[in-house]
Image (cartoon, rainbow, N blue to C red):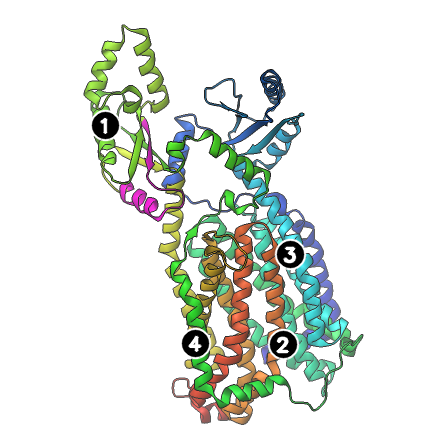
């Protein structure tokens, strides 16, 4: 019994085990506190055509990699002279910003003043996610005056605000979740000592994992969402594992010595933990197929925290319990009742008396909840992820309203770059480009196109060449051609802006850019713009997610099949999980997208279905393994499937419900956060765990166990008698 021996060793060498763990904790904790400083961006980075086009725009057309917008606003009574003097003074100070590649004031270009608003632009040759220090520096040069305000916005500022809001949300969620989790633990164990241990294990697992993640920052781009995901998974999972170990230890301690209790606990509960950790680990590993930073980050952080939590549960925790011994009962606040049948026992018997009715009722509820999920609209988190009152969001929405032309505000802009073999101003290349543009104009979804031809009022290459020759003797006409070429042509490349008759985050726009990106225009063509970025992200997920699902389903089936020597139990577990997760997505759509329960309608963050599925599928298997492991123990002793199911539910329901309650509290606390994707993710996980702990674990599992009887334990000819004989 390998795990039993591990328990003996943990007891025998407890001081050595604890000393090693203390060293590990101290070492990694030092780096854990540095982790926020190496996190950046929202994690949606993908090496595709969008990035290629962006590189061309930066290198060939001089477009900055990142821009910060300074939005100036004055009250009506402020004199125009004072207003202009304030802006000039501000930009005089901004000339000292050495980190910026360029500084453009409203006086340098037309259209940067409008009524009581004006804007300027600070450009940087760095990625938006790595400009947090530069933005803080920039803020020191800005100061408001009487009746005049200046606000910063743009992608770098929004990313920074998302990062800071995520960190504040994490602290807020912990302040809400941890005290309630402690109360739940006291109710579960009845004493302060036993209740505090799972929280200690949770903190140990999170600190160690975050310290390990710091070292991954040298080889990977880590998103700020790591700060939310690692504590969310780590705290819930490590508390779950600790609950199982402590509960079994206390149970064995009633009739056995400390050493025997630890040995049996690690052999039984430790086995369940290893199998459940494997399920969660594989569930998260499915995200690795998707080559987008945020999914890779969550997979990496989640897998590390699962490994650390499981290792901590079967080594550190047994050694700690051995040190405590009988003192685990210290400071008991709630004494357990004696010789009293629990409510769980009565409920399990009731369910198993009416298995068909209970099963149909549970399925009906789940299917009803699932229906809204059919209309789920997914979107990539952006400005609207921030709370409405955050300055960068307010400033961006004001800037968009005041300075984006009304006729283009509601249209989706796509940037197209044509690349020729020779000079783009050669007649044959201009002619090929004009034909390609005419082809684009024929699309019903295209509203308008900006190109060198619209700028000069000429329709094709031949006419352009002739008109340019004729204009050489006229200064104004020659200047018009020169300015058009400077903006739209760089050596062998031409810039074209296409405006579609669709708003942001449109399925039609994504389909259009996907279709037209694959056409042959006679020139090498690059498509860019935000909708191209979205299309590539969506396509990557839709193409790769099935591989992750196949890995999760197949691996989970094999692990559970080997763990329980059963064919039907893993099949049931997978099908029930899929159904309960579908119901979860339906409730999330009903709540957020349809705007019920006091929320304003907002699309569902693209990360939600992928993350919730990967996380909750594994965590639900966590509870499944805990429950079925105990039922199997009783079945091997008695050979009675019905009795074993009732006993298994009776002995584990309290601890599983406590674990689920803590998970719901820890993740549900993120409902009170301001960053919308994190809010949706926390609520989604909390709902999924609630459904799993109630309808699935309390109703569907016992009713199906009853209906299938001894067939639950059939395994390639290994029936009930074979199982009993081998036991």
The spot of residue 244 in percent (x, y) is 63, 75
Label 1 sits on residue: 434
Circle 3 residues within 10 Å: few <14, some 14–19, many ≥20: many
Give the image quarter of residue 151.
Answer: top right
Q: Earlier in the sequence, mark 3 or mark 1?
A: 3
Badge 1 element: helix
Looking at the rendering, the stretch of residues picked out in magenta corresponds to: 494-517
Between tags 3 and 2, which lies in front? 3
Label 2 sits on residue: 655
Circle 4 residues within 10 Å: few <14, some 14–19, many ≥20: some
Q: Is residue 116 above or below residue 172?
A: above
Circle 1 residues within 10 Å: few <14, some 14–19, many ≥20: many
Q: Earlier in the sequence, mark 4 or mark 3?
A: 3
The spot of residue 47 in percent (x, y) is 41, 43
Task: Name the residue: 59% across, 88% down.
Answer: 346
Badge 3 element: helix
Give the image quarter of residue 134.
Answer: top right
- Look at the image and say whether residue 340 sits in the magenta stretch: no
Q: Earlier in the sequence, mark 4 or mark 1?
A: 4
Label 3 sits on residue: 173
Q: Is residue 179 above or below residue 226?
A: below
Towards the viewer: 143 or 216? 143
Q: Is residue 721 above or below residue 202?
A: below
Q: Measure the C-alpha gap from mark 4 to mark 1.
A: 59 Å
Q: Measure the C-alpha gap from mark 2 to mark 1.
A: 70 Å
Say if residue 271 shows up in the picture: yes
Proximity of marks 3 and 2: CB atoms separated by less than 8 Å: no
């Amino acid at each position: 019994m390998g795990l039993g021996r591990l328990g003996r060793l943990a007891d025998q060498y407890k001081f050595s085990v604890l000393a090693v763990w203390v060293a590990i904790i101290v070492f990694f904790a030092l780096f854990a506190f540095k982790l926020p400083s190496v996190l950046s961006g929202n994690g949606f980075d993908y090496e595709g055509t969008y990035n290629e086009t962006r590189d061309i725009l930066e290198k060939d057309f001089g477009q900055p990699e990142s821009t910060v917008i300074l939005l100036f606003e004055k009250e009506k009574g402020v004199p125009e002279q004072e207003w202009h003097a304030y802006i000039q003074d501000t930009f005089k100070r901004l000339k000292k910003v050495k980190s910026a590649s360029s500084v453009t004031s409203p006086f340098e270009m037309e259209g940067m003043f409008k009524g009581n608003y004006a804007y300027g632009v600070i450009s940087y040759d760095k990625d938006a996610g790595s400009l947090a220090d530069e933005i803080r520096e920039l803020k020191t040069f800005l100061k408001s005056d009487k009746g005049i305000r200046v606000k910063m916005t743009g992608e770098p500022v929004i990313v920074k605000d998302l990062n800071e809001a995520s960190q504040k949300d994490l602290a807020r969620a912990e302040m809400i979740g941890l005290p309630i989790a402690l109360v739940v633990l006291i109710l579960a164990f009845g004493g302060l000592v036993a209740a505090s241990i799972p929280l200690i294990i949770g903190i140990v697992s999170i600190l160690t994992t975050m310290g390990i993640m710091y070292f991954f920052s040298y080889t990977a781009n880590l998103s700020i969402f790591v700060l939310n995901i690692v504590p969310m998974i780590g705290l819930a999972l490590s508390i779950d594992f600790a609950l199982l170990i402590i509960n079994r230890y206390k149970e064995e301690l009633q009739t056995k010595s400390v050493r025997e209790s630890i040995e049996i606990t690690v052999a039984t509960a430790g086995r369940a933990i290893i199998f459940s950790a494997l399920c969660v680990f594989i569930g998260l590993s499915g995200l690795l197929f998707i080559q987008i930073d945020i999914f890779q980050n969550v997979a990496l952080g989640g897998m590390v925290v699962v490994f650390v939590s499981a290792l901590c549960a079967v080594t550190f925790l047994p050694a700690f319990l051995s040190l405590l011994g009988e003192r685990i009962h210290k400071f008991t606040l709630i004494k357990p009742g004696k010789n009293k049948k629990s409510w769980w026992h009565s409920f399990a018997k009731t369910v198993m008396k009416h298995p068909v009715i209970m099963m149909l009722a549970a399925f009906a509820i789940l299917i009803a909840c699932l229906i809204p999920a059919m209309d789920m609209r997914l979107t990539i988190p952006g400005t609207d992820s921030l709370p409405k009152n955050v300055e960068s969001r307010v400033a961006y929405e004001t800037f968009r309203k005041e300075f984006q032309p009304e006729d283009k505000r509601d249209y989706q802009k796509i940037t197209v770059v044509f690349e020729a073999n020779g000079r783009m101003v050669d007649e044959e290349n201009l002619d090929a480009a004009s034909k390609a543009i005419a082809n684009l104009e024929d699309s019903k979804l295209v509203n308008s196109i900006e190109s060198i031809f619209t700028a000069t009022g000429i329709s094709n290459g031949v006419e352009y060449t002739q008109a340019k020759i004729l204009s050489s003797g006229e200064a104004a006409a020659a200047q018009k051609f020169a300015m058009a070429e400077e903006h739209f042509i760089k050596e062998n490349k031409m810039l074209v802006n296409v405006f579609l008759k669709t708003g942001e985050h449109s399925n039609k726009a994504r389909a259009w850019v996907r279709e037209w990106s694959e056409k042959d225009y006679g020139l090498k063509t690059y498509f860019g713009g935000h909708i191209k970025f979205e299309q590539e992200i969506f396509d990557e997920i839709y193409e790769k997610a099935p591989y992750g699902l196949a890995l999760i389903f197949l691996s989970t089936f094999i692990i559970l099949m080997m763990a329980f020597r059963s064919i039907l139990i893993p099949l049931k577990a997978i099908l029930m999980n899929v159904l309960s997760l579908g119901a979860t997505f339906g409730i999330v759509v009903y709540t957020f997208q349809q705007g019920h329960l006091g929320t304003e309608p907002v699309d569902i963050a693209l990360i939600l279905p992928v993350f919730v599925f990967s996380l909750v599928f594994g965590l639900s298997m966590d509870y499944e393994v805990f429950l079925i492991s105990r039922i199997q123990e009783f079945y091997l002793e008695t050979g009675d499937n019905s009795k074993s199911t009732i006993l298994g539910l009776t002995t584990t329901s309290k601890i599983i419900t406590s674990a689920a309650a803590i998970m719901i509290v820890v993740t549900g606390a993120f409902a009170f956060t301001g960053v919308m994707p994190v809010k949706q993710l926390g609520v989604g996980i909390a709902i999924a765990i609630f459904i799993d702990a109630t309808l699935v674990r309390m109703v569907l599992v016992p009713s199906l166990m009853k209906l299938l009887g001894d067939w639950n334990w059939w395994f390639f000819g290994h029936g009930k008698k074979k199982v009993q004989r081998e036991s």
